[in-house]
Image (cartoon, rainbow, N blue to C red):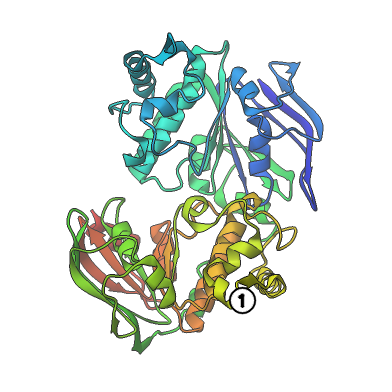
Amino acid sequence: MYQLIDVVKSFPGVKALKGISLTIGRGEIVGLVGENGAGKSTLMKIISGAYRPDAGEIRLNGQPVRFDNARQAMDRGIGMVFQEQSTISNLSVMENIFLGFEKPFVRRGVIDWKAMAAAARKQLAKVRLDIDPATITGTLSFAERQLVELAKVLTLEERVEGDLIILLDEPTSVLSRAEVEMLFALVRDLRSRASFIFVSHRLDEVMDISDRIYVFRDGEVAAEMTKAEADVETIQHRMVGRDIDKHYYREHRQHPYDAGTVLLEADGLSQAGHYRNVSFALHAGEVLSLVGTEGSGREAIMRTLFGLERPHLGAIRIKGAPAGRLSARESVARGMAYVPRERKVEGIVAGMSVMENITLPQLARYSRGGVLRHGAERDLAREWIGALSIKAPSEAADCGTLSGGNQQKVVLAKWRSAGADIILLDHPTRGLDIGAKEDVYDMVRAMCADGCGVILIADTLEEAIGLSHTILVVRDGDVRRRFDCAPGAKPTLYDLVHDMV
């Protein structure tokens, strides 16, 4: 059994945890939900040993424990599967699994790769992942990398006595339904050897997998409930302290787009192995969603539009002008913005301040004679922090320390302050809580009202339907169907799924 008793943790200007108490029983799956900034991430870092609490007590099997670092927590059987993933992309799968624990495979100063591969296969079998342990991790899909992360944590079984405690931080955020079901089956099978804390903003999944659920709000436990007591409406209300706006996707603010103003055109785009003959037009004030299963080609289309990948055939026109050999730099110069799904990898620069992240694509505007005008940068950052209600101690705060929702707001502030009017959103609400999602939906509607065009890959089909003026269903690289989505005449989930699969 693992217990936290009145745990407190503060940072400059922020009291992240205000006397948290919770219990994890043997073989139990405990769900943890709350808005971004509610204290979930801080709690997970305390349990995993990354942070030390300022006050309170931690007990493991009835005995007080104190971890000074993550290694000490791992030595007691506590491991974490991270939302943003901790695997190193240019190392092999087996190197990632045993990173920091290579000693058993060293023979006279040389690693016995054959022995490591055999041991890695044993760990991969636990998570039912049949791949060559020598595979470079960066070549795997997100779901496969997630399973490698879990296999890495499960190596603790051979190194520690007793049961494990495994922390799952948003493990399903970009997984397909089939992949989620496979992960949940694995978790249930592992309960005889491990207890789990499952953190997610997908409330239906939390209720599905959890035995008990803790709801966090403003650094405190707002509610504790069993699986039988939980329902989505109750959890939402406890999370945000208010009823969720019935106009969740802001459909009442969806207005017809300007059919006479075309911002972006794709004409016969094809990329071998990914998509073919893709054509569409994006208009001012329009939200156009690309809907499809993982690997359908929609992600590659999005990255091509921004210049991160090149098509083999076809053309792109931006505001009527041919794009030619488009690059990301050229896209930004032409008023395009890209908000990627993995915001900590491609969206923000952790270690740089909120101010520096916001002004990053427009430094020429804020420099004179090669010297940055920090006062002007600071004024801009403060303006957008206020406009988007970004929760940060100041504009000088490290962007990497903000919650996921506030990091996403910084990414959007970066592009909107730069004057971008073609906005590419790849899973913009991935890993965000209900309140932060509503903020993003408000921003999408505001951007459309300002004459921007938005291309969206949504986190759910409901989100795509609720936000969109137009939906293109992509299957096996082909655009199979186009839906008009006027308020009151939107397609159903069945309509989309019928063409997706």
**Whether residue 275 is visible:** yes
Residue at 46 percent across and 26 percent down: it is 152
In which quadrant of the rendered image does the N terminus lie? top right
Between 27 and 142, the one nearer to me in the picture: 142
Residue placed at 70% from the left, 24% from the top? 67
- In this rendered view, identify the residue nearer to me: 34 or 212: 34
Question: Which residue in the structure is indicated by mark 1?
Answer: 369
Residue 389 sits in quarter: bottom right
Label 1 element class: loop
Q: Is residue 290 above or below residue 267?
A: above
- Give how far across and how far down residue 151 sits, in percent: 43, 26
Residue farthest to the right, as pictured: 55
The part of the image, by quadrant, that contains residue 43 is: top right
What's the amino acid at mark 1?
Gly
The answer to whether residue 71 is left or right of residue 134 is right
Q: Residue furthest bottom?
A: 260
Q: Give the crowd class for mark 1: few <14, some 14-19, many >=20 residues within 10 Å.
A: few
Residue 343 place in picture, x, y as percent: 50, 54
Picture coordinates of residue 427, whole percent (x, y):
44, 58
Residue 487 visible in this rendered orientation of the protein: no
Residue 32 occupies quadrant: top right
227 is higher (above) or lower (below) than 154: below
Where is residue 330? Give x, y as percent: 38, 72
